[in-house]
Image (spheres, rainbow, N blue to C red):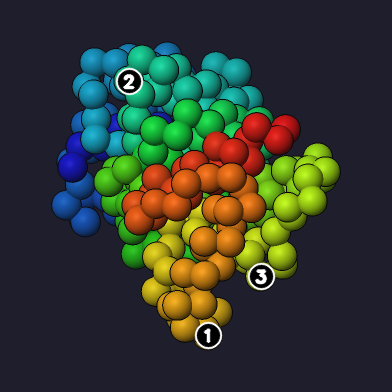
Amino acid sequence: MRVVLAEDLFLLRDGLVRLLRAYDFEIAAAVESGPELDRALAELKPDVAVVDVRLPPTHTDEGLQCALRARRERPGLPVLVLSQHVEQLYARELLADGSGGVGYLLKDRVFDADQFVDAVRRVAAGGTAMDPQVIQQLLARRAAGDRSPARLTPRELEVLELMAQGRSNAAIAALLVVTERAIAKHTSNIFAKLGLEVSDDDNRRVLAVLAYLDHGR
């Protein structure tokens, strides 16, 4: 699996390169600036991009802007974003096209190598890997502007957050200590209330829900 990595801090960039190589990823490029990332994504066409939000020359949202440009040129390009905080506008924009392969992790909440590598692989496969805090902020913004009577219950919101992290019904059932049948019922209720078609494709249904939430901004 070929990875383009963008991180401006040398020690962190070198550490991520060593980590990914240890798990049999091929590092197609490891860059430190927005212009370098633009070129690498356009020329190398990686299987997945791992991108820090803030890159030179602006040190603001350069990494996310590069990722968005690349996904416009190549819809569905898998992108895993690393950040110190939640950039809500760009997180929603990444999710809104519904084409899959999106992750958003907060750096200080990645606690071990397996967690990070699993997120990279999940995103590369077209799935989602969203930090719970990212999902909570998106849901909170959607709920604040939602005047529809079809509001989700607290349990349904909890299930939706776990779905958005890329978890299966079985994994959600285990975490909430309920049956898988109960989770299936909650899932059906969520889609009914949001006016979305039920799908057996976990990644597609999560992206559809997140895209719907984006429209509430």
Say if 162 sits above or below 30 in the image.
Answer: below
Q: Residue 25: x percent and y percent?
A: 20, 47
Which one is in front, 134 or 179? 179
Mark 3 nearby-residue class (10 Å; few <14, some 14–19, many ≥20): few
Q: Is 198 left or right of 47, judged from the image as shown? A: right
| Amino acid carrying mark 1 in the image | Val
Q: Which residue is at a point 21% across and 56% down the rendered structure image?
A: 23
Using the numbered discs, state the Cα–Cα distance from disc 3 to disc 1 in whole angstroms. 12 Å
| Residue identifier under label 2 | 74
* Of the pair 75 and 16, the residue shown nearer to us: 75
Image marks 1 and 2: residues in contact by CB distance under 8 Å: no
Q: Amino acid at mark 3?
A: Arg
Q: Mark 1: few, some, or many residues within 10 Å (few <14, many ≥20)?
A: few
- What percent of the width, then of the height, locates residue 33? 45, 22
Quarter of image, res 79: top left
Q: Tag 2: residue type?
A: Arg
Q: Residue at x 59, y 45 (%)?
A: 195
Q: In terms of sequence position, does the residue under pointer 2 or pointer 3 come before the other?
A: 2
Secondary structure of residue under mark 1: loop
Q: CA distance from mark 1 to mark 2?
A: 40 Å
| Residue 37 appears in the picture as rendered | no
Going from the N terminus, do you reach mark 1 or mark 2 first? 2
- Pointer 3 and pointer 1: residues touching (CB < 8 Å)? no
Q: CA distance from mark 2 to mark 3?
A: 37 Å
Mark 1 lies on residue: 177
Q: Which residue is mark 3?
A: 155
**In the image: residue 144, left or right of residue 70:** right
Examine the image and state in which quarter residue 145 appears. top right
